[in-house]
Amino acid sequence: MKKINSIFIVDDDPITVYGIKKILTSVAQCNTIFEFKNGQVAIDQIRKLVLENSELPELIFLDINMPIMDGWEFLEDFIKLPIKESININIVTSSIDQYDKDRAEDFKSLTHHCIQFNSKPIKRSEIEEITEIVSV
């Protein structure tokens, strides 16, 4: 079974969070899964980890549409942080708008982090593929 130390799920939809966690725990050994209901709380936690020189998440599942700070605002702040390692960020959204897909591609070109665009509901096969890439 694949092993991933730390995963962040940044999504305000409890059903999506539950589904991702349920699939993750069946396809990978996850030491810690953190949940955040908006991008602001998640980016604050990542900034804290960076300042403390603590272990960062290896994998982030990120919704686009959330209150307080949406996924795009999160990404804007995230890519500015002094993080050397490449973190796998999976946008998980119900949006079918080509603009959102294009915007995800734009972010890919601005950073060394691995950014993927996934539609909700995310499938088990997609999460299996994601964990294959990330696992240590």
Image (cartoon, helix red, strand yellow):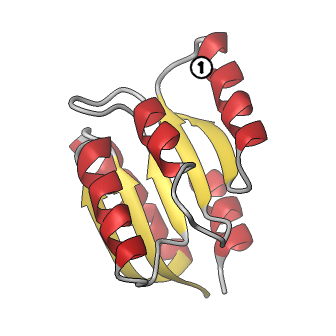
How many numbered marks appear?
1
Q: Quadrant of the N terminus?
A: bottom right
Expressed as whole percent of the image width and height from the top left, the position of residue 125 reads 65, 55
Q: Name the quadrant containing residue 82.
A: bottom right
* Left or right side of 102 for 91: left
The quarter holding residue 64 reads top left
Q: Position of residue 41 (x, y in %)?
A: 23, 52
Left or right: residue 13 compared with residue 78: left
For label 1, the SS is: helix
87 and 110: which is toward the camera:
110
Tell me the residue at 42%/56% (across/down): 20
Q: Which residue in the protein does label 1 denote?
A: 100
Instruction: Kindly identify the residue that appears in the image at 25 percent across and 39 percent down.
Output: 12
Examine the rendering and report whether any part of residue 98 can be seen. Answer: yes
Question: The residue under label 1 is which amino acid type?
Answer: Asp
Classify mark 1: residues with Cα within 10 Å, few (<14), some (14-19) or many (20+): some
Q: Using the rendered image of the protein, determine whether residue 123 is visible from the camera's viewpoint.
A: no
Q: Is residue 64 above or below residue 126?
A: above
Please name the residue shown 66% across and 87% down the image.
136
Image position, residue 78 (x, y; %) = 49, 50
Q: Is residue 46 above or below residue 10?
A: below
Residue appearing at x 58%, y 53% in the figure: 89
**Location of residue 110 with respect to 129 vertically, above or below:** above
Q: Position of residue 86 (x, y in %)?
A: 68, 66
Q: Is residue 12 left or right of residue 58?
A: left
